[in-house]
């Protein structure tokens, strides 16, 4: 039930890198778009996250992260959400809308569905803990076509890792 060392290491590196993150100007409200995938499932996993200032629509953060081998689609989705929420928190967000195209992951993070798999329950708990650091939060499910930026970043991470083999 533990985070894989590579993923935990990445989250620690992210936290360190964001210590001096550019703070949000004016509006402290953001939209965090997330996605993840694995090829095959389970397989080589990657996630993407995009943070946008809700007032201006400006993209203030984007990440494309390779998560390693043996990752499931759902694990990658959670990692994308966690990536984006941590970045938003580091930039001083006070209001967040977390947006993803996985109805399962969005529903589990929102507490509307149970995570019966212990690994998924752990990732849900991490995502909920990260979200709890931001005072105002909502979670929204969208269709995949509406999540093109985060989807492209997740795919880019997997493709880049495959070409570097």
Image (cartoon, rainbow, N blue to C red):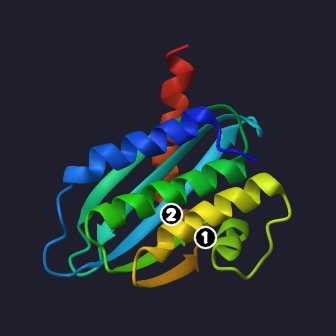
**Is residue 100 at least partly visible in the picture?**
no
* Residue nearest the viewer, comparing 81 with 59: 81
Q: What residue sits 44% from the left and 78% below the top? A: 97
The residue most toward the top is: 165
| Image location of residue 52, percent across then percent down | 31, 68
* Residue nearest the viewer, comparing 155 with 118: 118
* Residue nearest the viewer, comparing 88 with 97: 88
Q: In this view, does 81 lie above or below 135?
A: above
**Is residue 48 at least partly visible in the picture?**
yes
Q: Is residue 123 above or below residue 131?
A: above
The numbered disc on residue 143 is: 1
Residue 109 is left or right of residue 56, and the answer is right
Residue 25 is left or right of residue 73, and the answer is left
Secondary-structure class at tag 1: loop
Give the residue number, with chain letter if any, for mark 2.
147
Which image quadrant for residue 102?
Answer: bottom right
Q: What residue sits 43% from the left and 73% below the top? A: 133
Disc 2/disc 1 C-alpha distance (Å): 7 Å
The numbered disc on residue 116 is: none
The residue most toward the left is: 25
- Circles 2 and 1: CB distance less than 8 Å? yes
Q: What residue sits 38% from the left and 73% below the top? A: 31
């Amino acid at each position: 039930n533990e985070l894989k060392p590579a993923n935990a290491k990445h989250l620690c590196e992210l936290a360190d890198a964001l210590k001096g993150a550019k703070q949000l100007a004016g509006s402290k409200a953001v939209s965090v778009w997330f996605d993840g995938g694995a090829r095959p499932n389970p397989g080589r996993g990657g996630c993407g996250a995009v943070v946008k200032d809700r007032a201006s629509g400006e993209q203030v953060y984007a990440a494309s992260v390779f998560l390693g081998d043996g990752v499931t689609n759902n694990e990658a989705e959670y990692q994308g959400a966690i990536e984006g929420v941590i970045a938003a928190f580091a930039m001083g967000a006070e209001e967040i809308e977390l947006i993803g195209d996985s109805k399962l992951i969005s529903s589990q993070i929102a507490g509307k569905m149970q995570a019966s798999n212990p690994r998924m329950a752990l990732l849900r708990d991490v995502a909920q803990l990260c979200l709890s650091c931001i005072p105002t939060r909502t979670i929204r499910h969208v269709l995949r076509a509406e999540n093109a930026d985060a989807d492209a970043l997740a795919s880019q991470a997997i493709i880049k890792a495959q070409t570097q083999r």
